[in-house]
Amino acid sequence: MAEKVKQLNLERDYKKYLYFLDGNGNVCQKPKSGEGETRVLVPNAVERDNQFLYFIDKEGDVSRSPRAARKKKEKEAA
């Protein structure tokens, strides 16, 4: 289950743009066509923690959910 981290209420146009959080915690917008520059909409929106996956939710707010735990491979007896 995701928890809201910061309320931004961004107005988004998902037909033309992709919205994401970069490694520095900035909320960015990039054209879907691949042409054009990435634009920072909200600088330093969140302080990132590697144990969580951050995303922009339906309401235009920053949310996070826990990352899946990695499975450790057991050594097979040969």
Image (cartoon, rainbow, N blue to C red):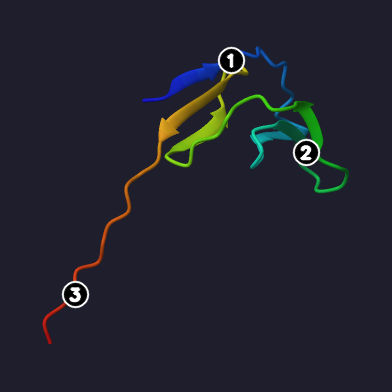
Q: Tag 2 or tag 1, which sits nearer the N-term?
A: 2
Residue hosting label 3 = 75
How far apart are the alpha carbons under marks 3 and 1? 45 Å
Amino acid type at mark 2: Lys
Dot 1 crowding, Cα within 10 Å, few <14, some 14–19, many 20+: few
Quarter location, residue 40: top right
At horizontal 25% and vertical 66% (from top left) the residue drawn is 73
Residue at the image point whose x is 56% and y is 31% from the top: 55
The residue indicated by pointer 1 is 59
The image quadrant of residue 76 is: bottom left
Decide: few, some or many residues near mark 2? Use Cα within 10 Å; few <14, some 14-19, many ≥20: some
Q: Mark 1 belongs to which amino acid?
A: Glu
Mark 1 falls on what kind of element? loop
| Disc 2 to disc 3, C-alpha distance | 44 Å
Q: Position of residue 50 (x, y in %)?
A: 48, 42
Is residue 10 shown left or right of residue 33? left
Residue shown at 49%/18% (left/top)? 4
The residue sitting at the right extreme is: 36
Residue 61 position in % (x across, y down): 59, 18
Judged by depth in the image, the label closer to the viewer, 3 or 1, is: 3
Residue 45 falls left or right of residue 32:
left
Which dot, 2 or 3, sits closer to the camera? 3
Q: Earlier in the sequence, mark 3 or mark 1?
A: 1
**Secondary structure state at the residue bearing disc 2:** strand
Could you say where residue 11 lies in the image, as x and y percent from the top left?
72, 16
Horizontal arrangement in the rendering, residue 62 relative to residue 12 (left or right): left
Callout 3 amino acid: Lys
Residue 58, compared with residue 28, is above or below; it is above
Residue where numbered disc 2 is placed: 30
Residue farthest bottom in this picture = 78
* Kind of element beneath mark 3: loop
